[in-house]
Amino acid sequence: MISKIAVTLLVSAVATSVADAQVKGLPVPIPAPTIYSAPTPAPLAPPINPGPATVPPAGLSPLLTEPEPIYPRAEQLMPAYPAQQFPGPVGEQSMQAFRNGIIAQQWLRDRAGISPSTERSREIQQQLNQTAR
């Protein structure tokens, strides 16, 4: 009985304080937001093992039992064009391409009017001297 009286007094005190706050222009406490969560799905039963596979009465397909191809393979024909002839071994080609790149850099620097006495021009000249050997 005492708890009912305490609850009644508490409810009336809260209602009075909210009413007083509205009259006085004070902010009214906002109730906490309700949070909804999606229900979890019911668990599924594990799959049932159907047992060993049965062989059809006509037997297995030859595609499954014979590992070789069904049709004979076509013979490898020689290409109608000859193999490409390279100017030299791959290492020589790489060195020539490197040298051509350095010569192109030197040409661009000369065309831009950069002095041959700069450090980069000396490096390029040194690399050209090394590859010429």
Image (tube, rainbow, N blue to C red):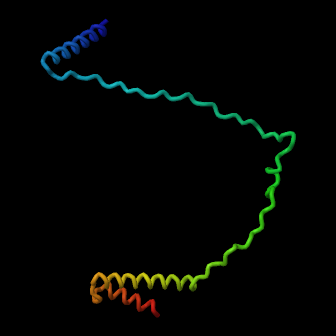
Q: Is residue 72 above or below residue 51?
A: below
Q: Is residue 78 above or below residue 21?
A: below
Q: Is residue 131 above or below residue 78?
A: below
Q: Position of residue 132 (x, y in %)?
A: 45, 92
Q: Position of residue 9 (x, y in %)?
A: 24, 10
Q: Residue furthest left?
A: 24
Q: For the point 45% across and 89% down, which residue is it?
A: 131
Residue sitting nearer the eye, 83 or 121: 83
The answer to which image quadrant residue 109 occupies is bottom left
Q: For the point 14% across and 15% down, which residue is it?
A: 23
Q: Is residue 111 left or right of residue 87?
A: left
Q: Position of residue 70 (x, y in %)?
A: 81, 56
Q: Residue furthest top?
A: 1
Q: For the point 42% across and 81% down, which residue is it?
A: 101
Q: Is residue 8 left or right of residue 107?
A: left
Quarter holding the N terminus is top left
Q: For the point 30% across and 86% down, which residue is it?
A: 119
Q: Residue furthest right?
A: 58
